Image: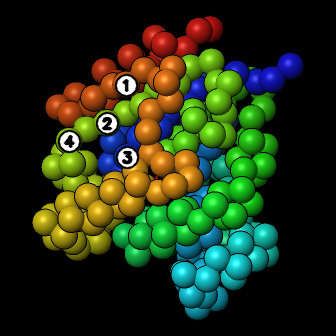
Amino acid sequence: LNAPVLTIDGPSGSGKGTISRLVAQQLGWHYLDSGALYRAVGVAAGWADLDLSDPGALVRCCFDSRIEFVEVPGQELRILVNGRDATDEIRTETAGAAASAIAAIPEVRTALKERQRNFRQLPGLVADGRDMGTVIFPDAATKVFLTASAEERAERRYKQLKEKGVSVNLGDLLREILARDARDASRAVAPLRPADDAVCIDTTGTGIEAVVERVLSLVQR
Ligand code: C5P
């Protein structure tokens, strides 16, 4: 029997990560941060000094890189790339931009498909990304698509980075977010779009708690 899946897709800064983690915690389900996987490949490619426009090299990088998600209860998920802790490095805008460029290559997406599907295990999975409901888990029982205005998403990222001690400019962040959105939505393979059977939730001006409650109410238990 297939474990139940809840997919949560949406653009960067829509609150996917926070909401997905909290919902997974509440349900006691596993959690897949698919963006972290693309980011980890981006970091691995950076370390190896690979050309981001060379699909062959990037696909080899997907197969050759050891990417591990280390769950320590009560702590932030650690991400190891070839044995090295890359948890902080994958969150930088550089890694995000590399991830987005890499994610536009069809062969890379194919190479990462099985890896993502392997996260589907009992008692259930919350899968967070761009194409969880459309491509990776099209048969998921519950699909959510989160959005928020670009301005609010930029502000959320700004606060997040500031708390981490990273100094950034809000205007730059907004421009980067808009550029990444455009690239993610316009690519030929697995563009960012809600699945036909997804419930769309606009989180602009809505608190985390309320969104978590709304998503939980959609999951049939
Ligand atoms: O969600 P996050 O911002 O960490 O994702 C980084 C990038 O990885 C996105 O901009 C997108 O290009 C790519 N991605 C993707 N498919 C996913 C998750 C992330 O293409 N399922």
Q: Is mark 2 within 8 Å of ligand 1?
A: no
Q: Secondary structure at mark 2?
A: strand
Q: Earlier in the sequence, mark 2 or mark 1?
A: 2
Q: Earlier in the sequence, mark 3 or mark 4?
A: 3
The residue that appears at 65% across and 30% down in the rendered structure is 138
Q: Position of residue 43 (x, y in %)?
A: 56, 76
Q: Is residue 192 left or right of residue 79?
A: left
Q: Residues within 10 Å of mark 4 (few under 14, many from 20)?
A: few
Q: Is residue 168 left or right of residue 211?
A: left
CB atoms of marks 3 and 2 within 8 Å = yes
Q: Position of residue 106 (x, y in %)?
A: 63, 61
CB atoms of marks 2 and 1 within 8 Å = yes
The amino acid sitting under disc 3 is: Pro
* Foreground of the two, 195 or 43: 195
Residue for badge 2? 147
Residue for badge 4? 149
The disc label shown at residue 11, or none: 3
Q: Residues within 10 Å of mark 1 (few under 14, many from 20)?
A: some
Give the color scheme: rainbow, by chain, secondary structure or one colour. Answer: rainbow
Q: CA distance from mark 3 to mark 2?
A: 7 Å
The residue that appears at 74% across and 35% down in the rendered structure is 120
- The answer to which quarter of the image holds residue 30 is top right
Q: Secondary structure at mark 1?
A: strand
Residue for badge 1? 200
Q: Position of residue 35 (x, y in %)?
A: 53, 54
Q: CA distance from mark 3 to mark 4?
A: 10 Å
Q: Is residue 49 above or below residue 215?
A: below
The amino acid sitting under disc 2 is: Thr
Q: Earlier in the sequence, mark 3 or mark 2?
A: 3
